[in-house]
Amino acid sequence: MLKIENLHASIEEKEILKGLNIEVKPGEVHAIMGPNGAGKSTLSSVIAGREEYEVTEGSIEFNGEEIGEMEADERAHKGIFMSFQYPVEIPGISVTNFIKTAINETRKAQGLEDMPASDMLKKIKEKAELLEIDRKFLSRSLNEGFSGGEKKRNEIFQMAMLEPKLAILDETDSGLDIDALKIVANGVNKLKSKDNAVIVITHYQRLLDYIVPDFVHVLYDGKIVKSGTKELALELEAKGYDWIKQEVTA
Ligand code: ADP
Ligand code: MG
Ligand code: MG
């Protein structure tokens, strides 16, 4: 599904990703961990196509197609979803109306008509039930006065509605409490299927107490320097990142 080879990317002339490789197949959950400043958020932004970042070398293939030069919108329409670290508040637009618009825009880009209102309602109801989101929440103004947990709930709801092929969740926010992490984890666990894939970026091992990743990667100094399974996350929790640094520089 996603195949990244020798990816180099810069922001403001500064190279952040320095030859990164990763491959993600349908049905897999990958966790990317690593110390602050390693390039984790840069990687998610580069995959999503945020324009501040410049890809200087390497390739990003999504379902066999090179997407490294595509606009963020186009990538989203192809099924790449990225959570926002700093979600915008939109007073007067409800959680539901926002997602309706997003879905119909995606359909339009795919040459489809708007989703019939009754189907939309049915889908909203189904996903809200699955994620145990109540109606009151759905009619609130987008992100206005949302707690950390409510922002996460909204994000997971958007993901459930859009049904992306690849979801990238960058859990950088140190303000997240356990409840918020559980919302993310439960959402990921409920939404994962054999056809979609999830990349969860975090420097908190505790998120991985609730999501069981198929693979754990360590991103250090712009590269994936180590990959393993859940045990690697536990090892990182116990030993920190210093031993990785030593291995890399040895
Ligand atoms: P992580 O998410 O792993 O903590 P980031 O991808 O946010 O790391 O950042 C990687 C490096 O890129 C850091 O050294 C950071 O200072 C730098 N960086 C991030 N954003 C910018 C920016 N807008 N301008 C300049 N440098 C940046
Ligand atoms: Mg950071
Ligand atoms: Mg980050």
Image: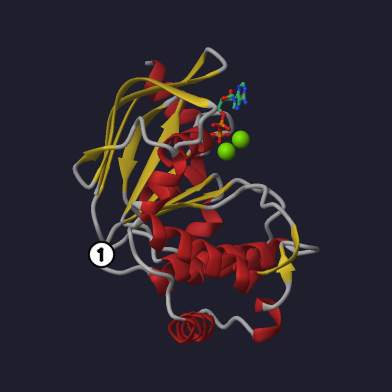
- Looking at the image, residue 56 lies above or below residue 134: above
Residue 17 visible, this angle:
no
What residue lies at 49% left-to-right and 37% top-to-bottom? 45
- Looking at the image, residue 183 lies above or below residue 18: below
Label tally: 1
Q: Nearer the viewer, residue 232 or 86?
A: 86
Q: What is the x, y in percent for residue 239?
A: 50, 40
Q: Single out the residue that lies furthest toward the left.
A: 64
Q: What is the x, y in percent for residue 59?
A: 28, 28
What residue lies at 50% left-to-right and 72% top-to-bottom? 186
Label 1 secondary element: loop
Query: Does mark 1's beta carbon lie closer than 8 Å to ligand 3?
Result: no
Dot 1 crowding, Cα within 10 Å, few <14, some 14–19, many 20+: few
Q: Nearer the viewer, residue 180 or 72?
A: 72
Name the quarter showing ligand 2.
top right
Amino acid identity at mark 1? Asp
Q: Is residue 43 left or right of residue 154?
A: left
Q: What is the x, y in percent for residue 230?
A: 37, 54
In this figure, which residue is indicated by the disc labeled 1?
195
- Looking at the image, residue 75 lies above or below residue 179: above
Q: What is the x, y in percent for residue 104?
A: 46, 65
Q: Single out the residue that lies furthest toward the right.
A: 145
Residue 110 visible, this angle:
yes
Q: Is residue 129 left or right of residue 167?
A: right
- Looking at the image, residue 210 lies above or below residue 204: below
Q: Is residue 191 left or right of residue 193?
A: right
Residue 179 figure quarter:
bottom right
Q: Single out the residue that lies furthest toward the top.
A: 13
